[in-house]
Each structure stands twice: as structure tokens, then as C-alpha cells.
Amino acid sequence: MAFYDLLFYLISAFIMYLGYKNIEKKASAFDLPENIAALTIQQAENLLVNLRGLFFLIIFLAIFLILLIILSWSLFKGLNWCIASKKKFNLKFFKRFLLLNLAWIPIWILLLFFVIIGINPDSILYFIMAILAIAVYLTNILYALYTKESNLKAVKKAFKIALTKMHFFVIPYIIMLTIAYVLLKILIFNLQNMPLLTALILIFTIFIAWSRLYIVEIVDSVT
């Protein structure tokens, strides 16, 4: 399972890198005049058209990259959750899992977007952390259920379990978050040490794979 996690991280990083380089190339080719006030009406209109084109290009690339990452996520995470749940991964499951993620992931992206533009900057980090924590908590339960049932009833069931069986997840999540926090702290302070950095990334990836197995066991025990 850790192998598929690594593949997803590498592919996602590559996709984001290509998107960034593409946007950087388009932006660097854009000639913004030093004195905008001195432009003629025709020049100002042309500038506005070019700016609008650049803006829509960035939006299009962002959506396209998100869709590519969701596709990659659905493939590799689908494989991982099927392995953890001892279920067969096939094209039928992949299509259903992809459709689930095309609906589920954008909800959280939009929620984060509205928080970023609407919340006071002094407290925005706490809101983002809270949303990410809730998203991870619900998503793990949903994926564990959906892998077994492969139908949209799993969404309603996931919310029910998340609310009514929360006490079963408190201690496991505290343990997992503590381990993840320690690993990330070590990772952050050793970014220049490539051998240790590589080892920590591998350990963190294996830890994520183990956490998935643990969550499947918990969800099985409460359903």
C-alpha cells in the first residue's frame, strides 16, 4: 500500500510542477507597461483583454490540475483502500470511486476557498486546520464504508458513524496525530539532510498505510 501512496505523491507533485511552470511561462511572457495611466484607450482595452485571458487560463489550468489529481487520487487511494479492506479493485469500482471523489473533494476545496476569502487572517489558520481535520476524519470513514458497499448510502452512513461513534475514534486518532506530528517536526528540521529526509518520507508513508488498516478495523467493528 505504501508503494501506491508514494506513486500518488510523486505524480501529484509532477502535475503541480508542470502546472506551475506553465503559468509561470505565460505570466513571464505577459508585457505589463510601467505607466498604466499613460496608456491610450485602445492600449488599455488590449491590456484588459490580455489580463482577462491570463486570468481565465489560470482558472482553467487550476481546474484541470485538480481534476488530474482527483483522477490520480481515485486510482491509487482506491487501490489502497481495496487492499486494506481485502476487496477486489476493478474498473467498475474505480468509476464509482472516481464519481464519489468528483463530488466529495470539490466540496472541501470550495469550503476552504470560502474560509480563506471570508475569515479574519488572524484566525484563518485555525479554521483551515479544523476543516482539514474534519475532512480527514469523515473521508477515512467514508472510504472504509464505500470500499465495502460501493454505493452512495455509504455517505449517509459515514456521517452517522462519525457523529454517533466518535468515541471509538478519539484515542486512535490522538495516537495517529501524535505520531504524524512528531514525524513532521523531524521532517521540517531536516530538510537539508537528504538521506534522513528520504527515510522519514518512507516512514511517514508506511505510517499512513498502517493508519488506513487501523481505520478499516475500527469501522468494521462499529458497523
Image: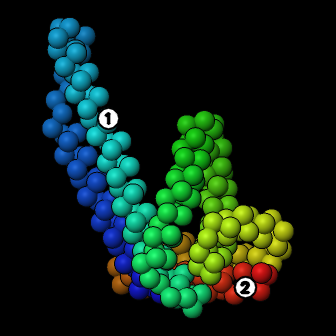
Q: Which residue carries the number 2 mark?
A: 220
Q: How many marks?
A: 2
Name the residue located 61 percent from the left edge and 70 percent from the top edge: 151
The spot of residue 106 in percent (x, y) is 52, 53
Q: Amino acid at mark 1?
A: Phe
| Residue 141 numbered mark, or none | none
Q: Which residue carries the number 1 mark?
A: 55
Of 182 and 89, nearer the camera is 89
Q: Quadrant of residue 176?
A: bottom right
The spot of residue 16 in percent (x, y) is 33, 59
Could you tell whether 161 is left or right of 73 in the image? right
Display colour scheme = rainbow
Please determine whether, in this image, residue 173 is positioned above or below residue 13. below
Of 160 and 69, nearer the camera is 160
Q: How far is the residue under mark 1 from the one under mark 2?
A: 47 Å
Could you tell whether 145 is left or right of 37 in the image? right
Name the residue located 39 percent from the left edge and 69 percent from the top edge: 72
The secondary element bearing badge 2 is classed as helix
| Res. 147 visible in picture | yes
Name the residue located 67 percent from the left edge and 70 percent from the top edge: 154
The spot of residue 59 in percent (x, y) is 36, 42
Q: Amino acid at mark 2?
A: Asp
The secondary element bearing badge 1 is classed as helix
Q: How many neighbours does mark 2 have within 10 angstroms: few (below 14), some (14-19), or many (20 or more)?
A: some
Name the residue located 60 percent from the left edge and 43 percent from the top edge: 115
Q: How many neighbours does mark 1 have within 10 angstroms: few (below 14), some (14-19), or many (20 or more)?
A: few
Callout 1 touching callout 2 (CB < 8 Å): no
The spot of residue 124 in percent (x, y) is 62, 45
